[in-house]
Structure formats: C-alpha cells, structure tokens
C-alpha cells in the first residue's frame, strides 16, 4: 500500500508576479513542468523578499520535487526551512513524513505525521499515513486507531476502511 500524497500548489499565494510576464512566483506556482517549477521556486527563494509563509511554501514545493527525484538531503533541508518559516503549516511535516515513510524510517514518519495532526486535527491523510507507519512497525492497535480517526474525518476514505476492516478481521 502506498502512502497517500498531496501536492502542494502555491495557488495565488505568491504576490508581486504579473500575469503578463511569467516570473519566479508564476513558475513556482505551476505544476505541469517540474523543472520549470523547481527553477521558479529556487529563484523565488533566492530573492528572499516574500512573506515568510510564501517563502515556506516555495521551500515546500521545491522539497516535494527533490523528494520525487530521490534527492533526500536537499528535500530534508527544504522541509526544515519550510517548517522554520511557517511552523503552523501542517503540510511541511506531513510531506516530510512521506519522505521518511518511503525511506522506511517509520518512527520519524510517525513523529512528523503526529506533528501534522497536532497542527490540523482534521487532516485525514496524516492519520491514514500514520496508521500505515504504525502497521509497518507492527503496532496494529495504534494503526487501527488512526484508521478509525481517518474514517471519522473522511467517511468516504476507502483506503482507511479497507485497512481497518483487514486489521479487525485478524
């Protein structure tokens, strides 16, 4: 079972970029061309003139690209920068948790998913993925509790339902 992912998109958060002229913010916002997005986020970060929340989102977007490309050290650095710039954003620990999960570092993944749900108690995917990490470590009771919480938040979650049913049938 793969962990559930979300893609972070800057949307309209980065201000100061004209719609008539593509700039770093526009490039960092788009998701069709990851190379362009990476260059845009890097240029936006290097300018260093955005609001902390916007710089954090640029770091987060760049970290997700690095993670997809298997550049874990670069991703970890950007996740740390994002968390320092915007410590209240649950997406940074959540996405870093996904990186740790993929690296089979389940204890670290659980810690990050736990931080994400502390920041947003309605973050169903963080509960689901924390349950997957608990299950990988053999803690089925904690996994079942997290799957149940994910279902309470998102009753349509087939992944959580399936995992919970499987654990309850054992």
Image: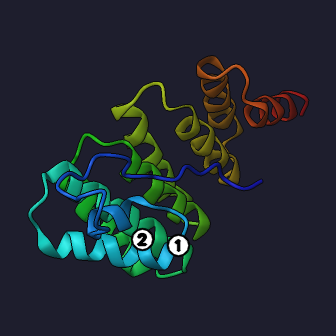
Q: Residue at x 54, y 58 (%)?
A: 98
Q: Position of residue 143 (x, y in %)?
A: 66, 37
- Cβ–Cβ below 8 Å for labels 1 and 2? yes
Quick one: SS at disc 2? helix
Choose between 159 and 143: the one closer to the eye.
159
Q: From this view, report whether residue 101 is shown above or below residue 41.
A: above
Choose between 29 and 165: the one closer to the eye.
29
Quadrant holding the C terminus: top right
Name which quarter of the figure residue 78 lies in. bottom left
> Which numbered marker is on residue 37?
2
Density class for disc 2 (Cα within 10 Å; few <14, some 14-19, many ≥20) is many
Can the viewer see residue 77 in this picture?
Answer: no
Outermost left residue: 49
Residue at the disc numbered 1? 33
Q: Residue at x 40, y 75 (%)?
A: 38
Q: CA distance from mark 1 to mark 2?
A: 6 Å
Side (left or right) of 66 relative to 115? right
């Amino acid at each position: 079972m793969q962990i559930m992912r979300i893609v972070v998109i800057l949307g309209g958060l980065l201000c100061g970029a004209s719609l008539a002229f593509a700039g770093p913010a526009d490039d960092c916002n788009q998701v069709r061309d990851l190379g362009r997005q990476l260059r845009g986020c890097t240029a936006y970060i290097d300018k260093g003139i955005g609001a902390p929340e916007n710089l954090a989102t640029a770091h987060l977007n760049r970290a997700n690209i690095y993670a997809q490309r298997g550049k874990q050290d670069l991703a970890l650095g950007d996740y740390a920068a994002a968390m320092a710039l915007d410590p209240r954003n649950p997406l940074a620990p959540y996405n870093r948790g996904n990186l740790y999960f993929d690296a089979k570092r389940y204890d670290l993944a659980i810690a990050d998913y736990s931080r994400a749900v502390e920041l947003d108690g309605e973050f169903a995917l963080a509960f689901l993925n924390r349950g997957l990490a608990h299950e990988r470590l053999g803690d089925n009771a904690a996994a079942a509790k997290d799957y149940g919480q994910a279902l309470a938040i998102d009753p349509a979650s087939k992944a959580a339902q399936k995992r919970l049913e499987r654990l309850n049938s054992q």
